[in-house]
Amino acid sequence: MRIALAGNPNSGKTTLFNAITGRIEHVGNWPGVTVAKKEGDVKRELNRTGSTIRAVDLPGAYSISPFTSEECITSNFIRDEDPDVIINIVDAASLRRSLFFTTQLLELGIPVVIALNKIDQVKRKGITINTDKLAEKLKCKVIETSSTRKKGLAELIAAAAEVRGKGQEAPFSSPAGLDDTDRAGVEAADRERFAFVDKLVEEVEVRKIDSSRLTIQDAVDRIVAHKIWGIPIFAVVIFAVFSISQVWLGPLLADYFVGWIDGLYAYVEGLLGDGVSPLLSALLLDGIIGGVGAVVGFLPLIMVMFFLLALLEDCGYMARVAVVMDRYLKKVGLSGRSIIPMILGTGCAIPGVMATRTIRDPRQRRTTAMLTPFMPCGAKLPVIALFAGVFFKDAAWVGTTMYFMGIAIVIVGALIIRRIVRESPVRSFFIMELPEYRLPSIKRAFISMMSRAKAFIIKAGTIILVCNALVHIMQAFTWSFQPVEEGMQSTSILATLATPFAVLLIPLGFGAWQLAAAALTGFIAKENVVGTLAVVYSISNFIDTEEFVLVSGAGDVAAVLGLTSVSALAYLMFNLFTPPCFAAIGAMNAEMGSRKWLWAAIGFQFGMGYTVAYLVYQIGTLITTGSFGNAVIPGFLAVAFFIGLLIHLMHRKEQRASAGVKEVA
Amino acid sequence: MELAITNLLFNRKAKNRKLDAVKQQNLTHAKVNCTYNIRGIDTEDKCMKDFLFTLGCFEGEKVTVISVLADNYIIHVKDARYSIDKELARAILI
């Protein structure tokens, strides 16, 4: 038996889905988080039927006639895939709006059960709903639920199982034989539908407070989403997130954690003893445990960060950030919806890029897919944390700056792309339901954090482990498969492969082949930058750098890497703002649906990363030492070529546009 | 005669201007926390109109502007709150 979960955006479908199936799909206290359908089996303890019930979570829709692509997925599924029962999730606080969709669902003949969700919130607001009367009027079962508190779920599933195969009577039907293309007719019918709903709500609902008045929530909104203060407040919030995760709480936890990894290293070392070939033990110890350990060492920092971001999302703040950012994105020719992919992109670029699907205009959609990977994702956090820790004494401003640098690049990038690609005539508009602020749930944030941590560990144990092993082998052997001799590191496979790339990076202040190799492996997964640095420099502990100094006696990590603070910053930015990992590029390919756009995007991302790193290194070096850094002229030529190409493309568009005007005239 | 014609012309102009003013009265002119009746949706974009319709935002319905945040208008329609941009606010005539 299959049940479809359908309802308005932000009515809590995915939370309900997670509660009844035990899955952990990403939820946010704001609309538009789900863009594709998701399936899962209902948990045994809720399902008393004895047979499996499959639940399908659908993206939010306001009506059965599709106006957005998410609504398309929903209405296509309900119409074509013939679910046995529809559970219509209704936000009890906005019956007047929600029941419009409900009456449409009731017309399909598929049995419907209404989950009157967020019932606890409604009661607090002084709204009373006569559930029995509502059920009677709508001719279907109505179950009061609270998916966040897991109330009414077993009843809901039982009700769904009971009505299966019974058919559905419609309380309101649009006139028979109404043609979809008859606009006036459809509109008249829908007006009647709304009138029917209004009358129904009058009968079943009593409101003590007029909700169209200004509340404390609105007062808070006026501050956090203020025209001028909105951005500084967001900056302070992000700074706080970095301070807590990278300076206060994160390192504290990381210290313990790294202690265990060091313990494991010592244990395995003891276990191997002297009998094992030194090459094999080096591979196991320095390549695998050292490399993966260096990445995993950052796990506590990242978990704290994900936890805080989940709290922010859950309390409703992120929706306000979307409102604040909307005006800036509008000004640079993006859609207001572009902010949603970008905020999701701070977790991982792949769901971020996938969320661009909700943008109607192809130019805006592709531009957003191209720019979303500039937002620092979870995989880039270890890289940021490493450089902030080693070069900047764990300063929280490093991470915060990288966030706002990402936003700035997005804005500049959007401006450039708008001037290259012709704008389509479609006017975009932005509408978003503002969710209510609520006390964020520690439990939900914890679950979200654990699921991300799990994904991180799986990645570290698979892709990153294999990469580190390969990197270790490649740096330990020459092309003739002889072990690299002491002092002859530049003859290794890895060195000879990376050196040509390293030459290109000299103008950016980091021409060492080791750094180039790390940046290259970063395209497989960004965490690899940390892993590879650990392997090639034989450093397994980036967290507790003081201890490292004692062990190696070679000064500090900064000295080993041979980077100044300025070139370290340039290297960090190069890794953050060049193309994302291959998986994210794959997602870009899928959403853009155009090879030309994909290659242009990759080229643009490379050019942007190179230019930013070049400017940071050269200008920073000029300020700190009084003269330019290495190879300023060749670097300048490369950057000038990139900028010249962009200007040429912009110019070409203008010419074409003016030619177009002449043709029309 | 001349005067009459001028008068007629002038009045007509004045009348027209008045009509224009009424026509242009949209949500961006709304006072915060006052409830208005929606007089119509003025847009070329059929999709936008249909979409607003599904939210219950069409002529005859009541709308309240709760606050103006950045360039967005927080409106209250059918017991639900939305943040809409200026473009949309301009299209909703009151």
Image (spheres, coloured by chain):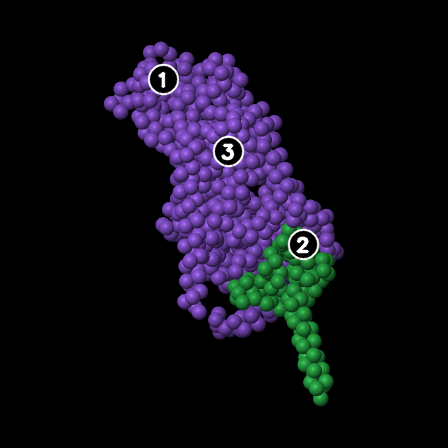
Chain colours: A purple, B green
Residue A429 visible in the current orientation: yes
Q: Are marks 3 and 1 in contact (CB under 8 Å)?
A: no
Seen from the viewer's position, the closer of residues A619 and A496 is A619
Q: Position of residue A616 (x, y in %)?
A: 50, 34
Residue at horizontal 41%, vertical 34%? A633
Residue at horizontal 24%, vertical 23%? A480
Seen from the viewer's position, the closer of residues A14 and A288 is A288
Closer to viewer: mark 3 or mark 1: 3
Q: Amino acid at mark 3?
A: Ile
Q: Position of residue A319 (x, y in %)?
A: 60, 47
Q: Amino acid at mark 2?
A: Val
The chain to which mark 2 is attached is B
* Residue annotated with mark 1: A281
Instruction: Name the disc covering residue A619, or none.
Output: 3
**How many C-alpha atoms fall within 10 Å of the one at disc 2: few (<14), some, or many (≥20)?**
many
The chain to which mark 1 is attached is A
**Mark 3 or mark 1, which has the lower sequence index?**
1
Q: Quadrant of the C terminus of chain B?
A: bottom right
Instruction: Name the disc covering residue B68, or none.
Output: 2
Q: Secondary structure at mark 3?
A: helix
Q: Amino acid at mark 1?
A: Ser
- Whether A103 is drawn above or below A320: the answer is below
